[in-house]
Amino acid sequence: MIATALLATPALAQTQDQAAADGPPKRVRSILLYGQESCPKPADPDEIVVCSNAGESPYRIPKRFRDQPKQDAPSTSWTRRMEVVEEVNDRGIPNSCSPVGTGGQTGCTRQMLQQWYQDKLDRETKAARVP
């Protein structure tokens, strides 16, 4: 057994020395492929070509982002429409944050808090749609 171990040691050392002498490849190319493109062959033996499929076309929006929910007026909920109507019609009454009428200035803080909360909900909704 000792003789076998002694004979295997020089062979193992030669393999490690050869790998160290070869070293890493001199050039590594990373290529994105679109559609039916094929991966090109390396130009010389010291080159490694890494290919990955990037989808249908570099100019096309990926399918998961194409059908986003609409944000136009007909797609707005009735609750939000009523909130807009109330905002427009409550000028001049108490808690309206308006310079017109008595008590119009009392609702400015309330209005800022409502606006902050609505902005927060909108940001969370948009963030939930992005994968």
Image (cartoon, grey):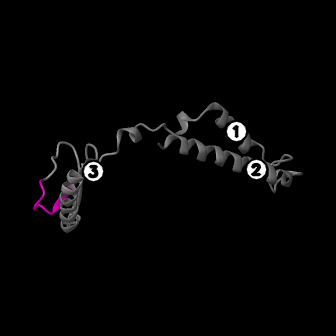
Image-based side of 18 in relation to 96, left or right: left
Q: Amino acid at mark 1?
A: Glu
Dividing the picture into quarters, in which one does residue 45 lie?
Answer: bottom left
Which region of the structure is painted magenta? Answer: 41-50
What residue is drawn where x is 28% and y is 47%? 54
Contact? badges 1 and 2 (CB < 8 Å): no
Residue 16 visible to an observer of this rendering: yes
Q: Residues within 10 Å of mark 2 (few under 14, many from 20)?
A: few
Q: In front: 20, or 2? A: 2
The residue carrying mark 2 is: 113
Magenta stretch: helix, strand or loop mostly: loop
Q: In front: 113, or 19? A: 19
Q: In front: 19, or 71? A: 19
Q: Amino acid at mark 3?
A: Pro
Q: Any magenta on residue 49?
A: yes
Q: Amino acid at mark 2?
A: Leu
Q: Position of residue 106 (x, y in %)?
A: 86, 52
Contact? badges 2 and 3 (CB < 8 Å): no
Q: Residues within 10 Å of mark 3 (few under 14, many from 20)?
A: few
Choose the circle earlier in sequence order: 3 or 1. Answer: 3
The residue carrying mark 3 is: 58
Q: Position of residue 113 (x, y in %)?
A: 76, 50
Element under label 1?
helix
Q: In front: 100, or 128? A: 128
The residue carrying mark 1 is: 83
Element under label 2?
helix
